[in-house]
Amino acid sequence: MVGYAASVGAKVIDGNGLAERIKRETAQAVRDLAGEGVRVSLAAVMVGDPSAGEIYARSQARRCQDVGISYRLHALPPTASDADVRAKLRELNDDPAVTGILLNLPLPSGLDTPAAQYCIDPYKDVEGVNPSNIGLLFYDTPIVAPCTALAVMEILKEAAVEPRGLDAVVVGQGPIAGRPVSLFLLQKMATVTNCHIATRDLREHTRRADLLIVAVGKPGLIRAEHVKPGAVVIDVGISTVTGADSARKVVGDVAYEEVSSIASVITPVPGGVGPVTVAILLRSAVHAARQQRATPRRLSGH
């Protein structure tokens, strides 16, 4: 059972604690693979400002180092073309020393993000963004699934929330969270409604949800009036806002103080889905390495 912070109303999921447990398990898996002669290695590709690349590199390298994963950043200049990006990704696909590939987004304006993602070998696609993996998710057989969606399902599992038979409402239909989560919930036999910018009456849908998952990126979108008393609320959104005191803070899509008083379970922002997603990414890097070892015939990028 996941740990909960003290709360007047809802049980507040400790995403940081869950993430630390996942990372400990991942570190052990990395050691086990090393004992079998397999080195887990993650290559990140970034296009743009070199100084920003250094910041990303330090953060990503530290997280990988914590669990024993080898990490290297491949920085391409802001002037890089689509062909340059695809060439680098193909080079990493063909490098047997690289077991995982991460494409840092957003790419500079004018570059074709889906085309670049399609170039990543599905067996090295640690974020689960290659169209092959997204498509296989439809059949519940992805090689690697999207990390944010996996994090949501991991939180539900640890909180002992069984989706089967629940009325689940997912607000947001993005390709890395909303849509994959909806598919996962359907596979778990929940009755799923997906809401988005064209939904006419959001409250009408969210008020009947036993399980409400919000992944939009709009601060305070979901208020107490949107939530059924006793619902499980998972907040995937993350934004930075400036308060009345001019201080900047990170918030989610859910008006936390209002909703936590009526929900049965809730994830905070920060400290909820975010750290679990990072930990899942590291775990997916290990999973990718195992898949490559077990599967002699691999799909290749285009």
Image (tube, rainbow, N blue to C red):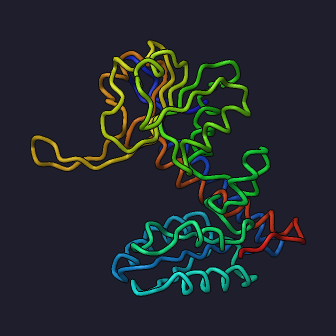
Q: Position of residue 82 (x, y in %)?
A: 53, 81
Q: Quadrant of the N terminus?
A: top right
The residue lying at 52 percent from left, 55 percent from top is 278
Q: Quadrant of the C terminus?
A: bottom right
29 relative to 156 in the view: left or right: right
86 relative to 39 in the view: left or right: left
Q: Position of residue 222 (x, y in %)?
A: 36, 28
Q: Up-down: is 256 above or below 38? A: above
User: Can you tell which quarter of the image residue 237 is in?
Assistant: top left
Q: Position of residue 143 (x, y in %)?
A: 76, 57
Residue that lies at the very extreme toward the right in this rendered image: 296
User: Can you tell which quarter of the image residue 284 is in?
Assistant: bottom right
Number of callouts in the render?
Answer: 0
User: Can you tell which quarter of the image residue 48 is in?
Assistant: bottom left
Q: Up-down: is 156 above or below 93? A: above
Q: Viewer-proximal residue, 63 or 162?
A: 162
The residue lying at 88 percent from left, 66 percent from top is 295
Q: Viewer-proximal residue, 62 or 110?
A: 110
Residue that lies at the very extreme toward the left in this rendered image: 245
Q: Position of residue 246 (x, y in %)?
A: 11, 48
Q: Viewer-proximal residue, 34 or 61?
A: 61
Q: Up-down: is 169 above or below 64? A: above
258 relative to 90 in the view: left or right: left
The residue lying at 58 percent from left, 69 percent from top is 102
Q: Up-down: is 233 above or below 148? A: above
